[in-house]
Image: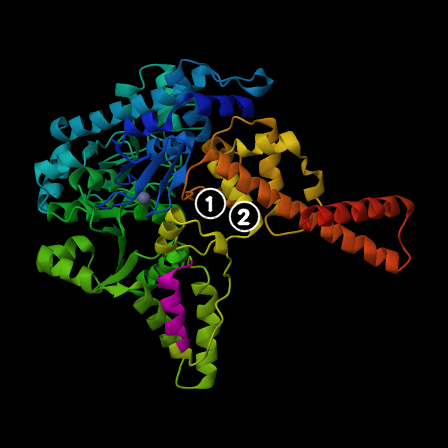
Amino acid sequence: MAGRIPQQFIDDLLNRVDIVEVVDSRVPLKKKGKEYMACCPFHSEKTPSFTVSQNKQFYHCFGCKANGSAIGFLMEYEHLSFPEAIEELARTQGIEVPYEGGQRPDPAIKKAQTDLYELMQEVDKYFQQQLRQHPQAKSAVSYLKERGLSGEIAKDFGIGFASDSWDDLLKTLGTSPEREKGLVTTGMLIKKDNGKCYDRFRNRIMFPIRDRRGRCIAFGGRILPSDTPNTDKEGAKYLNSPETPLFHKGRELYGLYEARQALRDIPRLMVVEGYMDVVALAQFDLRYAVATLGTATTADHIQRLFQLTTEVVFCFDGDRAGKDAAWRALQTCLPEMRDGRETRFMFLPEGEDPDSYIRKVGKEAFETEIKQASTFSEYLFKQLTDEADISGIGGRAKLVEKARPMLSQMPEGIYRKLMFEQLEKLGRVELSQPGSTGITRTNRAKDRRQSTTNAKTQMSPVRKAITLLLFQPALALAWFKKNNDAELTKLDLPGMELLLEVLEILRNSPDLSTSALIERWRDTPTANHLATLATWQPELDDSKALEIEFSALMDALKKQAVDLRYDDLQAKLDHGTLNEAEMSEYKMLLQQIYNAKSASKPE
Ligand SMILES: [Zn+2]
């Protein structure tokens, strides 16, 4: 394990790089006023709602709420880990990343990682070549032709062939002990107890699985139908690469890279079961199908899908297993059902898969069925009302009991509100919506309003103080010149702890940009909260005026702290439980309050 990267280095690095450059070299930006804009790279849109602020060194999308620093952008866009993103930024600045405890990541490890990608690229090429050249490949080619696949689609998806041999791949690519080791690590070879290796994929049509950047990270292999029944125990119809350092099946979707290549705007993404379905649908020019890889749909999958489109369609078999899978998928979707997003559930007639069905009915009818498939709300309420007889009170109670915790998982917004209204109608009850917090209650319209108006009335002083600090972190320094935060620590108000935390960080590192500040909360819910506050813009961007406003807010908070402490001590005094130290504090506060009152009295 490499040591931690010192916070100071991360702060300095974020001070050196310009997020506008980092983003612009990947997503061309247009300057608009003080900010830079583009169509969001993380969700599908036609009018730009993705903004990059040079001042705050921060990006934010008003559509999908993606946000973060230059580090966050690289992680999300380039699909990098946190240390990798820092390495990448440091590289552009020509500086080296220090690691605490002197434990630099072994450069050999990074090299090895790169080598694995290169090795997989060779494997990918090799399988494709085998499909064209290997004498056994004839049966594979005729199988693909039977399924109606053109050479063009086979090429788009990089379909290949693994011969019926225990060591073809091993002999061809495992030409050194290091390469053999790499092939084991990537799951292409299996190592036996006696140390000998053999090919994992044999006599299979090979489907390369690509990551976001199009790199081959794993394979799915479909066994070839043969006259002699395959007796070896790995003769499963479909075989996927195991989990490897490159491949995590809960995160990857087969066909997603290819869909992005084929379509400029992705109208919807459809989740099907197998890679052959994805390819067969592509052959019918339906290029938006993707498949999970031997796993149920995960939250990661759903998030990734909604980053690229606003409509996700699940296509399942019409049997019991398909219905169960659909219900599980619906539940995974709940936290992602924001306004403007839709999910549909489509069930195929029994005995059909997407491949056979589109062949039978054609693309047009297939797409009509997609468009008519049950929406999220239709499917959810249909399932629940099928289970409970809502003509009676008992059934309605059961419905509400079951639906309420589900709907509560939805993010705040109109969609969720309408779902609750529907539930009230069906259950014939009035419900107070649980789980509402002021912090997360945002919708696009409100965000817009907050970004243009002061929204003074909607914010508590604590929240406003944090907001001002996010807009202009230098406010902290000016304030600390004349004050200390000790008086505030006693104030038990919502958000106070966070405000003190922000102040403390800025006291120690006064030069932090907004994004570097928010970086400190990486991977916590607070980061999102702060990011929302960071979108606020003052009506008049005048740093002196902001300093005065901030100072006034802090004074008010301090006064509140004094008053509360005074009340506290007064109560103790009344009960005769005041000790000596508290007594002198009490006298001091009394004096302070008296002074403040006489100072504010008009002459
Ligand atoms: Zn977006």
463 lies above or below 176: below
371 lies above or below 109: below
453 lies above or below 182: below
Q: Position of residue 272 (x, y in %)?
A: 25, 52
Q: Is mark 2 within 8 Å of ligand 1?
A: no
Q: How is the image coloured?
A: rainbow
Q: Is label 1 in contact with label 2 (beta carbons under 8 Å)?
A: yes
Residue position for label 1: 533
Q: Is residue 587 in the magenta section?
A: no
**Is residue 274 toward the left or the right of residue 196 in the image?**
left
Residue toward you, 435 or 189: 435
* Disc marking residue 551: none
Q: Residue at x 16, y 26 (%)?
A: 129
**Is residue 599 toward the left or the right of residue 326 in the image?**
right
Q: Residue at x 72, y 52 (%)?
A: 563
Q: Which amino acid type is marked by label 1?
A: Leu
Residue toward you, 302 or 536: 536
**Is residue 573 toward the left or the right of residue 63 in the image?**
right
Locate residue 585: give its quadrant. Answer: top right
Q: Main secondary structure of the magenta part?
A: helix
Q: Which residues are magenta?
A: 412-424
Residue toward you, 339 or 179: 339
Camera sees residue 524: no
Q: Report, in whole angstroms, how far the alpha carbon at label 1 lies from the one at label 2.
A: 8 Å
Q: Residue at x 39, y 23 (%)?
A: 113
Q: Earlier in the sequence, mark 1 or mark 2?
A: 2
Residue positioned most to the bottom: 392
Locate residue 390: give its quadrant. Answer: bottom left
Q: Which amino acid type is marked by label 2?
A: Arg
Residue position for label 2: 463
Disc 1 element: helix
